[in-house]
Image (cartoon, helix red, strand yellow):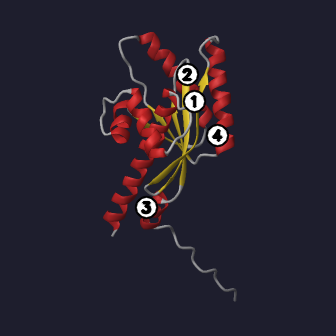
Amino acid sequence: MSEAAPPVPSPSLRDASRARQESCRILGLDPGSRLTGWGVIEADGADCRCLAHGRIEVGSLPVAQRLARIHAELGDIIALWQPSEAAVERVFVGRNVDSALKLGQARGAALAAIGVLEVAEYAPRAVKLATTGFGGAEKLQVAHMMRALLKVEGRLTADAADALAVALCHAQHRRLAGVLQARSIG
């Protein structure tokens, strides 16, 4: 008579909540048709730190080459930094339809590069509110807060600051979701 293997415990909601509060590497993206900002942060509970940031400049290239470069460079960034999640700024559609379409194409190239990573999307006002306390914050305010909150040293472009803000916004949302889930269980 063979002995049955002990049952493998299924993960509980408490375990899932704890996992959401543990360390996570997040790629933040601020897609643009000419400049795409990116930033990688390490979120460990309430503590977040910047690992890397930059921007992909494609302004003078033909459209197809712009999209290919965004896709290729983000693929390299993902391979190097190996984020477990990604956060992208949602497209703001103003009155200029042509600009919105170009932005959507750049965003599509970025999303295609992300591949199988879990992706969260945040509206620009939500990102600014979560990171500066004011949904109408200017780019200089966002950059200042990213320097202060993530202890970023050296040059920080507006595009990279926006991408870091998207990543930080996601880190805050995932942490809050974990806290709320833990409270509902306990």
Which one is earlier in the sequence, the residue at label 4 or at label 1? 4
> Pointer 4 and pointer 1: residues touching (CB < 8 Å)?
no
Q: How far apart are the alpha carbons under marks 3 and 1?
A: 29 Å
| Residue 78, numbered label | 4
Q: Quadrant of residue 95?
A: top left
The 10 Å Cα crowd at callout 4, few under 14, some 14 to 19, many 20 or more, is some
Which one is earlier in the sequence, the residue at label 3 or at label 4? 3
Inspect the image, locate mark 2, and give the three-letter code of the amino acid beneath it: Leu
Q: Position of residue 90 (x, y in %)?
A: 43, 30
| Residue 35, numbered label | 2
Which one is earlier in the sequence, the residue at label 3 or at label 2? 3
Q: How far apart are the alpha carbons under marks 4 and 1?
A: 11 Å
The 10 Å Cα crowd at callout 2, few under 14, some 14 to 19, many 20 or more, is some
Q: How far apart are the alpha carbons under marks 3 and 4?
A: 25 Å
In depth, the one of 143 and 87 nearer the eye is 143
From the image, state whether disc 3 or disc 4 is nearer to you.
4
Inspect the image, locate mark 4, and give the three-letter code of the amino acid beneath it: Ile
Residue at which label 1 appears:
110
Above-or-below relation of 47 to 149: below
Q: Position of residue 148 (x, y in %)?
A: 44, 43
Which one is earlier in the sequence, the residue at label 3 or at label 1? 3
